[in-house]
C-alpha cells in the first residue's frame, strides 16, 4: 500500500484519517509550459522525503491521518475532467468529519471541486493565491480551461484574489478590485495580510496555484511570473485564515515537471503539510 508521505498504514486508512487527498494528474489545456500532469507524482515523491515533525507548531500532522482517496484520471476533454472532479468531490464531501484536499494538475482541475464544495457549504469564500486572475468566461472554446479556473467561483461565491500580477484586459470587467490584491500593491503594503483577512470569512476554500510564489523559490510552474509571493508571509496569511475561518477544503495546483522541478516540488510538499498543521492546531 502506497501511503501519503510514506506514513504508517494505520495513519492512512479512511477510518483513522481526518484528511482526504485526491490527485488529478491533468494537463489538457495549458498553453505554455507543459508537464503539470506529473505534478501529483512529484509532490508525493517530495513528501516522502520531508521530515514529518513541524517545528513551528511542534506537531506531527500525519498522526491525524491522511487518506489517499483516489486519482481522477479522466482526460478525454476538459469538460469531462471537470465533471469527474465534481462528482468525486461531491462523493467525498459526504465524509463531513474530514478535510477535503486536492493536488493537481493544472488549475482547471479546481473548477469541479469548487463547484461541489460551493453546493455543500453556504457563504463560501474562495481564497485564490495565484499570479493570474483566471477569470476568462471561456478560453480556446472551453469554460473548463485553466484560464477560467475561478470565473464560475467569482459569480457564485466571495472570491478573494492574492498575488495577481498577470491579467488580460478582457478579464478586468470580472475583477472585483476591492477583493483583488495585486502583487505590486502587496509589495508596498505592510498591512496586506490584515487587509486580505478582512475580506475572508465563514467557510473557506483555498486554491493555490504555485505560480503565486516568486519563481526564485518556485521556478517549476507553467507560467513563472516575476514579482511573486514569498514563503513566510504566505504562511502567515494561511495560518491566520485557518485561525479565523472554517477552512472546508483546499487545493494546490500547477507543479510542473522540468529539470528544475525538485525545489518547487519540495516547496509544494512542505506547503501542503504546513496547511495540515494549521488545520489541526486550530481544531
Image: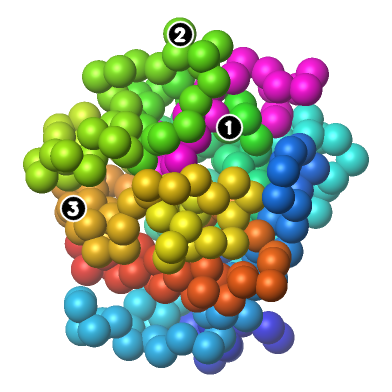
Magenta stretch, residue numbers: 125-145
Report the Cα–Cα distance between label 1 and label 2. 16 Å
Residue 24 in percent (x, y) is at 69, 54
Q: Name the residue under label 3.
A: 240
Label for residue 149? 1
Sequence-earlier tag: 1 or 2: 1
Q: In this view, does 98 lie to the left or right of 136?
A: left
What is the distance, in whole Å, between disc 2 and disc 3 at their CAs? 30 Å
The residue lying at 70 percent from left, 86 percent from top is 1
* Residue 279 among those drawn in magenta: no
Q: Is residue 53 above or below residue 81?
A: below
85 and 122: which is toward the camera: 85
Q: How crowded is mark 3: few (under 14 residues within 10 Å), some or many (20 or more)?
A: some
Q: Do the residues labelled 1 and 2 touch (CB within 8 Å)?
A: no
Residue 214: horizontal and vertical position, in percent?
A: 41, 55
In the image, farthest residue toward the right? 76
Residue 143, image x, y percentages: 69, 22
Cβ atoms under marks 1 and 3 closer than 8 Å:
no
Name the residue located 78 percent from the left edge and 22 percent from the top edge: 140
Residue 279 is drawn in which quadrant?
A: bottom left
Q: SS at mark 1? A: loop
- Between 143 and 93, which is closer to the camera in this rendering? 143
Asked whether 248 or 14 is in front, the reply is 248
Residue that sits furthest to the top in the current view: 173
Q: Name the residue under label 2.
A: 173
Q: How crowded is mark 1: few (under 14 residues within 10 Å), some or many (20 or more)?
A: many
Q: Are marks 2 and 3 in contact (CB under 8 Å)?
A: no
Main SS of residues in magenta: loop
Amino acid at each position: 500500500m502506497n501511503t501519503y508521505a510514506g506514513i504508517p498504514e494505520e495513519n492512512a486508512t479512511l477510518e483513522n484519517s481526518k484528511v482526504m487527498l485526491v490527485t488529478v494528474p491533468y494537463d489538457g489545456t495549458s498553453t505554455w509550459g507543459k508537464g503539470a500532469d506529473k505534478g501529483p507524482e512529484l509532490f508525493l515523491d517530495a513528501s516522502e522525503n520531508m521530515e514529518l515533525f513541524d517545528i513551528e507548531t511542534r506537531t506531527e500532522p500525519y498522526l491525524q491521518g491522511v487518506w489517499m482517496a483516489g486519482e481522477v484520471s479522466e482526460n478525454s476533454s476538459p469538460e469531462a475532467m471537470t465533471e469527474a472532479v465534481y462528482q468525486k468531490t461531491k462523493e467525498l464531501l459526504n465524509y463531513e468529519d474530514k478535510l477535503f484536499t486536492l493536488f493537481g494538475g493544472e488549475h482547471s482541475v479546481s473548477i469541479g471541486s469548487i463547484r461541489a464544495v460551493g453546493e455543500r457549504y453556504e457563504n463560501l469564500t474562495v481564497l485564490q493565491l495565484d499570479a493570474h486572475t483566471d477569470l476568462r468566461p471561456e478560453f480556446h472554446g472551453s469554460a473548463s480551461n485553466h484560464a477560467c479556473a475561478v470565473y464560475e467561483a467569482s459569480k457564485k461565491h466571495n472570491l478573494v484574489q492574492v498575488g495577481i500580477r498577470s491579467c488580460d484586459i478582457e478579464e478586468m470587467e470580472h475583477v472585483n478590485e476591492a477583493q483583488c490584491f495585486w502583487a505590486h500593491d502587496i509589495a508596498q503594503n505592510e498591512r496586506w495580510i490584515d487587509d486580505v483577512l478582512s475580506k475572508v470569512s465563514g467557510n473557506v476554500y483555498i486554491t493555490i496555484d504555485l505560480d503565486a510564489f516568486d519563481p526564485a523559490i518556485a521556478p517549476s510552474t507553467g507560467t513563472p511570473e516575476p514579482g511573486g509571493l514569498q514563503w513566510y508571509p504566505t504562511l502567515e496569511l494561511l495560518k491566520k485564515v485557518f485561525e479565523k475561518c472554517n477552512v472546508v477544503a483546499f487545493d494546490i495546483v500547477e507543479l510542473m515537471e522540468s529539470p528544475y522541478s525538485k525545489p518547487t516540488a519540495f516547496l509544494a510538499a512542505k506547503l501542503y503539510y504546513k496547511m495540515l498543521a494549521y488545520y489541526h492546531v486550530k481544531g
